[in-house]
Each structure stands twice: as C-alpha cells, then as structure tokens.
Amino acid sequence: MQNQISPLILSFGASDPVAATGIHADLASFAAMGCYGLPVITAILTGDTSQIDDLHPLDGDLVDEQARTVLEDMPVLAFKVGQAGSVENVTVIAEIVSDYPELPMVLDPFNAALTEQGPEAEDLVLAIRELLIPQASLLMISAVELSRLAETWKEGAEAETETGAEAEDLAADTMTLIESGCEYILVTGTTGETGEVVNTLYNETGIVRRDTWQRLPGSHAGAGSTLSAAIAALLANGLEIPEAVLEAQEFTHAALSHAQRLGMGRLIPDRYFWAREAS
C-alpha cells in the first residue's frame, strides 16, 4: 500500500544562489509546512546577502517544458508564482495555470531587492497585471509595489495628485485589481500608528483582516518569499485563504525572529527554527 504523499506545490521562480528568495526559499518554506515543492526555474539571479546584482531569464520554451512535464506526472495541489523574469515567461506561466483553474495560485511577482531595469520593465509589469493577476487566488504585494502597479492604469496627473490619502488610494487600487478577477490581495508593509508592520487582506467585500506585527530589528532578505510560499503551502494543506494568511504570517514572523547572519549582508530567515527549538 502506497503511503500518503505530501501535498505537491508547483513553484515558478528565480534561482537565488543565497537561497533567501525565489525557488530555494519556496522549497524550504514548503518543506517546513509539510509540503513537497516542485521547482520550475524562470531565471537565474546573481548576488550575495548584501544585494541582488542581476537577473538572467531562461527561455520561455524551457520554462514551459519544465512545468508541463511535471504536471503530466504528478498530482499538484497548488501553484506559487514568483518572479517570471520576462514577458515571454509571464505568457507561458499564464497559459499553464489557465489549464488548471481549480488549483489555487499564489502570486508574488515582485522582488523589492531587484530594481526592474531595461526597456522590458514596463511591458513586464503590464503583462503581469493583464495575464497573471486576474487568475490569482491571492496576490501578495507591498504597498510600494501596489502604488507603482497602479501607475499602469492611472493617468500621470491622477497618479501625482492622489498621493495625499494613502489608505484610500491603496483600498481603491486593490479593488481595481480584484475587479479584474483576482480573488484576494494581501497588501504588506504599511506602517501602523506606533511603527508596527501592518498587513491587510482584501477581497471583493473590502478588508477581510488586518494584522499588526512588531517590527523586528535588522535588515532581512526573503521575508516576502517566506510569507507567500507559506500561504501556498497552507492552501495546499486545505486551509481557506484568510486562515492561511494568518498562520503564514505567524510562521514568517517566527522565521524572521530566528534569522541568521550567514554572510556580511542581510539576515536570512530561518524556516527550520522549530526543528532547532525541538532539539
């Protein structure tokens, strides 16, 4: 008799040699949540714990072949989509996930540590907005990234004059994306009245939950990757999105509380803190 297998999650993302973000961060978070990650590499990053220097996208056909081959062989329960790396890869990923509409898809496409550069940057953001966000069960995005994304549908003058009421702007921007088809949006990184970190979950009804967390000292790499991967893992384990978002935040805060200085740069979350505590 075959043993029950761990929930399988197919993850699209970049290969980070530090394993702080991207595919390797996803695999660690999935494993910590009792899931088995299936990595589809979209790009290769270069850099260290101080910074990400560059991103080198893989060919779209190679991304497609990696994913399709695995999907024909294994019963995947969820998708996690991180950095796509190119417009071509966004198109490929969008076509793949559209063939599995019954599976939850967590979308975390922006990496704050890597400044998008080059002539394709604007086209990449537009492709994500038009092809991936409407298919997402949950889009995770920082307040800063959401404001930049909103510039793609706001007129220049409008974008400049609406900066006064930030909370109202964020709520309106999330509603615009939800109306496009995205089910939930988790806006991260706003600041509370006394300096805490505030993460707010929205759906078509408005605010679903708002969670406040103590701001931890130090500079961390990979907090966002840890959170979005943990959400995907909890969805694969059968939780509903609001509960998955809360539990994933608790896990991420603990991983950051136990972060390690592996190099001379930023701290790296310890996704296996619980194993060290047990020992």
Image (tube, helix red, strand yellow):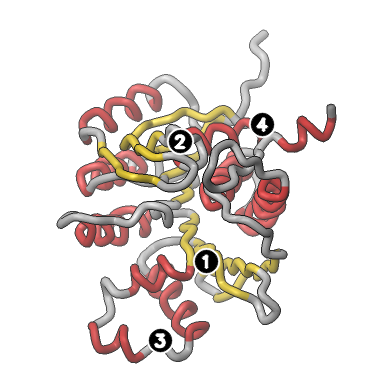
What residue lies at 28% left-to-right and 32% top-to-bottom?
Answer: 63
Which one is closest to the eye, mark 3 or mark 1? 3
Q: Earlier in the sequence, mark 2 or mark 1?
A: 2
The residue singled out by tag 1 in the image is 187
* Distance between mark 2 and mark 3 Cα atoms: 35 Å
The residue singled out by tag 3 in the image is 163
The residue singled out by tag 4 in the image is 34
Q: Quadrant of the C terminus?
A: top right
Picture coordinates of residue 218 (x, y %)? 63, 56
Q: Given contact means CB atoms under 8 Å apart, are the residues at marks 2 and 1 in contact?
A: no
* Distance between mark 2 and mark 1 Cα atoms: 22 Å
Badge 3 density bin: few <14, some 14–19, many ≥20, Cα 10 Å? few
Quadrant assignment, res 15: top left
Indicate left or right for 199 with 66 as reference: right
Q: Earlier in the sequence, mark 2 or mark 3?
A: 2
Question: Disc 3 on helix, strand or loop?
Answer: loop
Indicate left or right for 176 with 199 as reference: left
The answer to whether residue 51 is visible is yes
Q: Earlier in the sequence, mark 4 or mark 2?
A: 2
Q: Given contact means CB atoms under 8 Å apart, are the residues at marks 3 and 1 in contact?
A: no
Identify the amino acid type marked 2. Ile
Badge 4 density bin: few <14, some 14–19, many ≥20, Cα 10 Å? some
What residue lies at 45% left-to-right and 35% top-to-bottom?
Answer: 23
